Every structure is written in C-alpha cells, then in structure tokens.
Amino acid sequence: MKARIHITLKAGVLDPEGKAIENALGSLGFDGVNDVRKGKYIELEIADSDETTARDNLTRMCEALLANTVIENYAIDLEA
C-alpha cells in the first residue's frame, strides 16, 4: 500500500522559507504571488493491507517522527 503524507505549518507559525520563495518569485517577475507556505511531502510503501491499521500506524509515525505536531499539521492519503 502506498502512503502519501503532506506536512504543512500550522496557521500563525512564521514561515521564513516560504517568505524567501515569495520574494524570489517577485524578483523573477511573477507578480501577484502572496502568502507562500512551504511544506513537506513524504511517500512510503507500507506492508499493511488493512486501511485502518495502515492509517493508525502512519498516524503514530507522524506523531513520533515525521511531523512536529507543535507547529505542523499533517494529512495522510492512502492508495491500495
């Protein structure tokens, strides 16, 4: 089973890397780009065949290592 995890900063958390991207895009002539937020994308191939078990294991992975839940949100997408 393939898992895709999208990790983003929570609202209100400063994103200096996103701001740098926003400024660079403006310098390159891409006007009208605002509020850039940079996140992370992780793909995993997991052996679990049961979606509930897979989602539980992925949630534990995110909580333990993959996401800093103090400042980040995460979303899990599964594909059989």
Image (cartoon, rainbow, N blue to C red):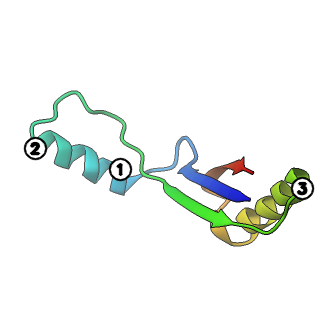
Say what secondary structure mark 2 lies in.
Answer: loop
- Name the kind of residue labelled 2 in the image: Leu
> Which residue position is annotated with label 1?
18
Q: Residues within 10 Å of mark 1 (few under 14, many from 20)?
A: some
- In the drawing, does residue 51 fall left or right of residue 21? right
Going from N to C along the chain, the mark reached first, 1 or 3, is: 1
The residue at 68%/58% (across/down) is: 2
- In the drawing, does residue 41 fall left or right of residue 21? right
> Which residue position is annotated with label 3?
50
Q: Residues within 10 Å of mark 3 (few under 14, many from 20)?
A: few
Going from N to C along the chain, the mark reached first, 1 or 2, is: 1
Q: Who is closer to the viewer here, 31 or 41?
A: 41
Q: Residues within 10 Å of mark 2 (few under 14, many from 20)?
A: few
Q: CA distance from mark 1 to mark 3?
A: 37 Å
Position of residue 27 measured from the top left corner of the image (x, y, whole percent) = 10, 44
The residue at 51%/49% (across/down) is: 13
Q: Which mark is residue 28?
A: 2
Q: Who is closer to the viewer here, 13 or 28?
A: 28
Q: Tell us which disc is closer to us: 3 or 2.
A: 3
Determine the residue located farthest toward the bottom in the rendered image: 65
Q: CA distance from mark 1 to mark 2?
A: 15 Å
Q: Which mark is residue 46?
A: none
59 versus 22 height, above or below: below
Q: Who is closer to the viewer here, 4 or 11?
A: 4
Position of residue 33 measured from the top left corner of the image (x, y, whole percent) = 26, 33
- In the drawing, does residue 76 fall left or right of residue 14? right
Q: Quadrant of residue 35?
A: top left
